[in-house]
Amino acid sequence: MTTLTSDTAMDELKAYIETVKKKARPESYLIAILHKAQHLYGYLDKEVMNEIAFIMNLPTAHIWGVATFYHYFNLTPKGEHTIAICLGTACYVKGAGDLLDTLKEELKITIGETTEDKLFTLQEARCLGACGLAPVIMIDEKIYGEMTPKKVVALLAHFRTEK
Amino acid sequence: MTAKNIAIYINDKPYQVQPGQTIMQAADLLGFHIPRLCYHPKLSLEGACRVCIVEVEGMRNYVASCAFPVTEGMKIHTNTEEIRRARRDIVELILDNHPQDCHICERDSNCELQRLAHTMGMKKHHFSGDRKRYEKDVSSVSVVRDPEKCILCGRCVRMCSEIQKVHNLGYAHRGFKTVVIPAYDMPFKDSVCTACGQCINVCPTAAFVEKNYTQELFQVLGDSSKIKVAHFAPSVRAAIGEAFGMEPKNLEKELVAALRKLGFDYVFDTQFGADLTIMEEAHELLARISGKGKLPMITSCSSAWMKSLEQFHPDLIENVSSCKSPMSMMSAIVKTYFADKLQRNPADIVSVGIMCCTAKKYEASRPEIVPSTDIVVTTREIAWMIKSAGISFPNIPGESFDQIMGLSSGAGAIFGATGGVMEAALRTAYEMYTGETLENIEFTEIRGLKGIKEAQVVMNGKEIRVAVVHGLGNTAELLDRVRKDNKYHFIEVMGCPGGCVGGGGQPYAGLNAIPLDEDALRKRAEVLYSIDRVKTIRRSHENPHVQRLYKEFLGKPNSEKAHHLLHTHYHAKEPRGIIPDHPIVK
Amino acid sequence: MEQPGSDTHLHNRSHAIFGDMSFFSKQMRIALRNCGTIDPDSIDDYLQARGYEALAKVLTEMTPPAVIDEIKKSGLRGRGGAGFPTGFKWELTAREQNEEKFIICNADEGDPGAFMDRSAIEGDPHTVIEGMLIAGYAVGAQQGIVYIRAEYPLAVQRLERAIVAARAEGFLGENILGSSFSFDIEIRLGAGAFVCGEETALMHSIEGFRGMPRPRPPFPSVQGLFGKPTVINNVETWANIPVIILDGAEWFGSIGTEKSKGTKVFALAGMINNTGLVEVPMGTTLRDMIYDIGGGIPNGKKFKAIQTGGPSGGCLSEQYLDTKIDYDSLAQAGSIMGSGGMIVIDEDSCMVNIAKFFLEFTQNESCGKCTPCREGTKRMLEILVRITEGKGEQGDIEKLERLGTTIKKASLCGLGQSAPNPVLSTIKNFRVEYEEHIHQKKCRSNFCDYLLTYTVTDKCVGCTLCRRVCPSAAVTGTPKLRHEIDQMKCIKCGLCFKSCKFSAITKTSH
């Protein structure tokens, strides 16, 4: 995720939409545009979605429907670190449920939320493809395997002090 | 209908049917009514509610009869023990996530879900559990959205997008948390909703209802210090019988009597206001044709269209007639001319519009429109009030309108049907412009339910090209044509399909009837055309009471006073609506 | 630590797994033939491994109907789960008269615990491209689309590079290899919706809509993406195509069982010694899979169940271990082939809880369009939660069965139609566990917290921590003396157990 000033981000988004508009059936690229917007802004802001609506000539209700349908899209700004807990079957069988409980307790948030200090956002993942290391959590695209509730607590402490 | 019939079996009985139909269509024609919820003949196929499932031999699972085509030799079962149970389970699952507060619900006794539950023979709750909880959205003055009552059949979403092309309603979120809501989960008052109320018309439950003002009205009616004035729209008299189980029929006199029994002091006819509108509008048209103002001129009496204009088509604001709607003209005259006659303070007079329309509630709240209509109730609301007050409608002796604003021409009556305003305006404009009598006053080419209708009239050798459009979806299409190739002089726009007869405040469809069925719209329109046919006065400018109003009070059409009282203005509003280039309902 | 899917990660994984020869001996690699042996970013490597030879063969030696015939003869069935005959699917699209047709690769692999498609694309992206090209030629399509999860950035990157390389070498684009056949491929990203694995939902997603399915017919082969005839197959299916063309339908048909030809890739995971991707000939037994390839259950634990097909599949008990892995045998046993998820469950796992886990997943992934799936899975889940919390009632099992059957038979799409499978199959094969939970309030695997009894042992030093954390004041005791738990007050939250620093609290099922 890149953090840019909103003007540069908007310029880049508009430039991207221009390339899309040259393709056949540009309206079908809405999800790709939302991916781009999220990449640029970290989440899907209402004003940004409005902008997309007008450039693409798509009703805002349609964009909102799509944005809220897919888990991948964030509708609020994310924390500094994103913790994804794998709830795939292998991890679950090996105790991911306990890890999730620990994370919820420690962070005082539930899946999809961001901590008050904006340090962590908690997300669930379906399978991170590291079943051999189950149970795993991923923090900012780095995998931590064979986790236990105690290791989770230690890991969170590490990220907190790093700040 | 030339294709060769195919043989199918329904419940072991052989039938010959046309190929290319769905199971439901074939079954309907053969006299089997398969229960249904999300299906609507005018809307795209959803296949979501699964209430219309049937068993087809050889298929592993049940199929949705609304979507599945018949094939040669197909053996269909609509009523086996197994299918009855599955269907009952499905309806029960819907009910288990529903407030089930039927006795305090606005749609008690005319709710499709309630009827369905009854037909299913629901005896027990097997699966009750957590139910969805949402706040009611009461922010709009016209439409109330209650997501707890919503069963996600999506008829409103498709109506709003496919027919009206407003795209205010959409599905948001997903799974058990799916909700029908405007963009960004915002309240209705901040949305692009045009208040047309068509979502209410197609909703099978009370997830969408009009903002109800019956309690306020009862309170006013009990206030002896006020002078209570009612005026009702043409379409109300044509359709109100349906709320009492009747076919569309002119119940004008019975309604006048019932309103007096309810406690109104004066009952006037909005058709008088319609005649007045024509006087102003025809003059405005002629002025524009002679170079004063933009062409085409577009009518302005549909309030949903007004809101749609300001949010979706602000570039055309100058094309729209400045005339207020008949309802607002009525209220303006009631609180001035009529107040003068009574020698009463206008503040003591309560002007109540009884309308086929939910958007008229919005119109009454517009700050630009003063003096305003104090309370607007729909056909549905007034029907309920009449029932609630114990009035034996419609079996009561009919009564006549109060005079001074009770006399109307046939032109005023046909306002309620699509094309009616245009026809009424042409009857007057022609004679004003040419000074000659128009021989054939029935413009049949602009009657009927075709989406966009066109006609030409030659006045003093000048060809006047007109178009008539109804339904906001068709409107968007016509306006695009206008933007590209402006060949029209005058356009009538009605926000609702069929015009006011199909308004968002009209009675709900009866048992096994389809909401907004074209047949029902045609019958309501026919009531209005038959009123016109038997009138001796069929042209607005011939209405002697309208003439008297100008003579005694307003002066001439488009006079300064008329302008002050009978005209208004529009301006672009946020949020701006977007009409996509392609259909976007999936 | 290495990232999953990174080169080192894959290398280490394969080394760790493939080091064991018994893991290899019963496997047969067709779809994954190049994975791990070629550099996925090198088209030259792929060309060395007979890459694009099948494409050249069809363009120069075979007519489109002959290609379809070959695929039909091979007996290849869709590897996405349902097992529809691939050649027949192609033929339906080929028959349609339409200037525009589409080929879609479904790489929206969503089963929790499955990563076959990701590994296949990461390890050998060109084979998917080649498979799609061959289908494009066979049915008369010009455009291919790979719909892939956004959560697979490396796979996306490899595929992007492969497409660029293939274009540069003239395998994609206008007049491919000098023929009159033109074809190109575009990547579209998913955005985290399991239901988009369903073909009509997937197509809606490509079209820029909410990924909600629609009733069929019309089938995608006739009226698919943008209303045009469309062939849609999953990654593994595409990976089989070039080999079938090169080595022939007869060869392919010689592998596997009568009605299920070729091999199948599985992501073997759970309580098993060797976890990872395996590719076995159809007809291999579950027993071989678990004990020979998988190396058995770790820590001397007893096997309890094997789950195939992910949230759409079922759990099979020990009596089914000799079931052959093929579409029909697995279905007959009460599970499904699925796209390749295979989880081994040992005696420590509670089957009611496993069923709950899968249902929680599908319930969360239900798109919300049709009533049975949206409302029904919610109710089933509520009943399961109740059972695992010790609040199960007489009649709950029957309710689950009734709801499950209605959802299965009345839902709009495959997700709903298969959502009850984990529950129905565990009721069928492990009914006694449900009954124990409901009637004896007992979880034989000591898994369901609410059915456990927490007791304080002699190890207690009276630190009072458990007393202080207990939300229901069930723990009593004075400092420095052994504490006690009032079972009537205990709400089984487990906080005392978690907080005890002396392991002085035990939980047991009665």
Image (cartoon, coloured by chain):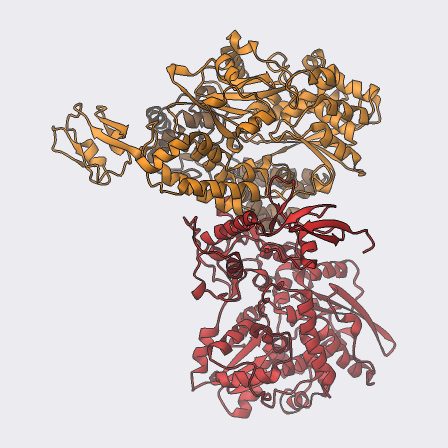
Chain colours: A brown, B red, C orange
- Considering only vertical position in the picture, is B572 above or below C8? below
Q: Nearer the viewer, residue C124 or B379?
A: B379
Question: In which quadrant will I find the C terminus of chain C?
Answer: top left
Question: In which quadrant will I find the N terminus of chain C?
Answer: top left
Instruction: Name the residue rendered at 55%, 21% in the picture.
Output: C266
Q: Is residue B538 among the parts visible in the rendering? A: no
Q: Nearer the viewer, residue B9 or C243?
A: B9
Query: In the figure, is residue C255 to the left or right of C449?
Result: right
Query: In the figure, is residue C368 to the left or right of C242?
Result: left
Q: Is residue A138 among the parts visible in the rendering? A: yes
Q: Nearer the viewer, residue B563 or B83?
A: B83
Q: Residue C167: horizontal and vertical position, in percent? A: 74, 23
Q: Residue B436: horizontal and vertical position, in percent? A: 83, 85
Q: Residue B143: horizontal and vertical position, in percent? A: 53, 64
Query: In the figure, is residue B170 to the left or right of A79?
Result: right
The answer to which quarter of the image holds residue C340 is top right
Q: Nearer the viewer, residue B541 or B354?
A: B354
The answer to which quarter of the image holds residue B328 is bottom right
Q: How many marks?
A: 0
Q: Residue A114: horizontal and vertical position, in percent? A: 41, 38
- Considering only vertical position in the picture, is C216 above or below B247? above
- Considering only vertical position in the picture, is A22 above or below B494? above
Query: In the figure, is residue B187 to the left or right of C176?
Result: left
In this view, the residue farthest toward the right is: B461
